[in-house]
Amino acid sequence: MEEISVPAMTLSRPPIDGAARAPRDLRAWVDAVERIGQLRRITEEVSRNEEMGAITYMAHQEINAPALLFENIKDTPRGFRALWNPLGSSVDRFAVAIGEPVGLGVMELVRRCKTKLMSPIPPVLVESEGAPVNENHLYDDKVDVRGFPAARHWAGDGGEYIGTCDAIITRDPDGGWLNVGTYRQMVQGKNQVGLYLSPGKDARLHIERYWSRNEPCEVVCCWGIDPALFIAASQTFPKTVSELDYVGGLKGAPVEMVKAERTSLLYPAHVEIAVEGVIAPNSQKLEGPFGEFTGYYGRPEDLAFLVDVKAVHHRDDPILTHALMADYPANECALLYSVARSARIWNDLERLGVPGIKGVYAHPAAAGGFAMTVVSLEQRYAGHASQALALTAQCPGGAYFSKWIVAVDEDVDPSNTNQVIWAMSTRCNPIEDIDILRQTWSTWLDPTQNPPEERPYGSKALINACMEHRYIKQFSKRTKIRRSVYESVAARWAQLGFKGRPPALWALED
Ligand SMILES: Cc1cc2nc3c(=O)[nH]c(=O)nc-3n(C[C@H](O)[C@H](O)[C@H](O)COP(=O)(O)O)c2cc1C
């Protein structure tokens, strides 16, 4: 075995739990969301074959439906469990995952997530012995991944999927940092899993570079993960950084890692299941199709990377996490991206020096939060809105798949669909205000382009729904409530007979 190199990590004691910290692991998060009524345990026996997927799709037709923990799964060892759509469409479950209070509005959560992503904390190395994930091991010939409750999510899926809400770790062959990405994995046999990677994804670039040197690519697949790890693993960060640092930032504490045994990699001490494997040069096998985030089956069955599993480590009574891909609100990507992707894009714009950004929102109903981004800004100079549009469309956090990028003025809440449509209808003159970017970063999963080989090359519409800057002083005056009147009405809201909080308004007359 090669010598293990662990750049930029020191052996440390686990940090002491602080009051404002995010849950330490998936189990602590499950307890926390159960306490706020956001978890449903299903003890009736269910099948891995379409049934858990169907129950999740049906239960999640309602926004804010609880996460589903299946505790009695046919053809699965007793005690092995499956958690579906941990975040779902719930702002509160996301807030709990990153140590924020429940009851926040979605734009406030985007802001807080953005701040946390600006303060990365590198991981630490802890002793392997005593790490929860090391409670059980299977090595070499004894490896069999089929016991874990993998599932056929949709009728047309090509097999049982074991990794959907997962974190896949690979090492950059030159820089040495560890990339963490969420990528689907299909069971191919007792010790083999398929790994599907879209063109341009970091793990794919790693594998291609190892293979170009005729070397295998080592991989760790984490299959039962806490939502903070999931949130960071599913975001696009610059290709030269490790997502583990951002998990630390989200949680306010470093991720504790242990040394792997059959590879030179590391894996998080608190995941439910960690699998070590190797992708030998040119090792691929037919995989898919899979019911995808677009609400369609993705590309037809085709070759995907094949992982040979060398070791399995798991907690007692492990929980496998599943993400159903579907139309909104049953899509596990949707709220996740409307918060974390928005925060990522906002940070990218700030780093690039685009001033005056008031908010960014990736709409959850737009193909799992991937397809539509609204950016709200205070227009400060000629061309400012066009610049914000082009950079929102192409910055690392927002470039993948997005098709509709809309700029609105600072008086429009980007998360308020009615306000955005109003701005598009009253401040956008399509012949002047729509541009198209061509040959942009897309995926084989986009059903709009055929034959499927065309799909990685997409296009984007940039829609300027801001008041025309050239004539902004003459632009018709919007009807707004005077701030002092709003404040006095809001103070008497309950007295006036209305339930709940008064609506937050972005546009008030000062
Ligand atoms: C639930 C879920 C499943 C995903 N599955 C895949 C997948 O199978 N393949 C893929 O390339 N990207 C997939 N993605 C998107 C990637 O996780 C995302 O683009 C991320 O940025 C990839 O990490 P990277 O930037 O380090 O490559 C998925 C995202 C989510 C939320």
Image (spheres, rainbow, N blue to C red):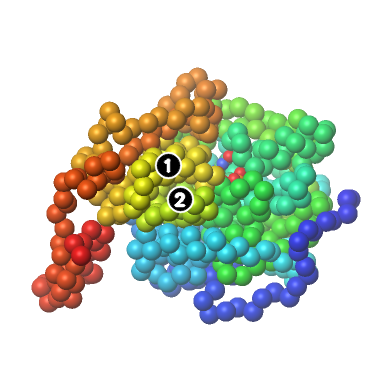
Secondary structure at badge 2 equals loop
Q: Which amino acid, mark 2? A: Val
Q: On screen, 364 above or below 448?
A: below
Q: Which amino acid, mark 1? A: Gln
Quadrant location, ligand no. 1: top right
Front residue of this view, candidates 376 and 306: 376
The circle drawn on residue 354 is 2
Residue 51 spot, x, y in % from top left: 46, 46
- Tell me if 229 is positioned left or right of 325 in this view: right
Can the viewer see residue 138 in this picture?
Answer: no
Work out how far the residue at label 1 is from the one at label 2, CA to CA, in angstroms.
8 Å
Residue 281 spot, x, y in % from top left: 78, 33
Identity of the residue furthest to the top in this view? 451
Residue at the spot 38% in from the left edge and 36% down from the top edge: 462
- Asked if the residues shown at circle 1 and circle 2 are in contact, with their CB atoms under 8 angstroms apart, the answer is yes
Residue 90 occupies which quadrant of the picture? Answer: bottom left
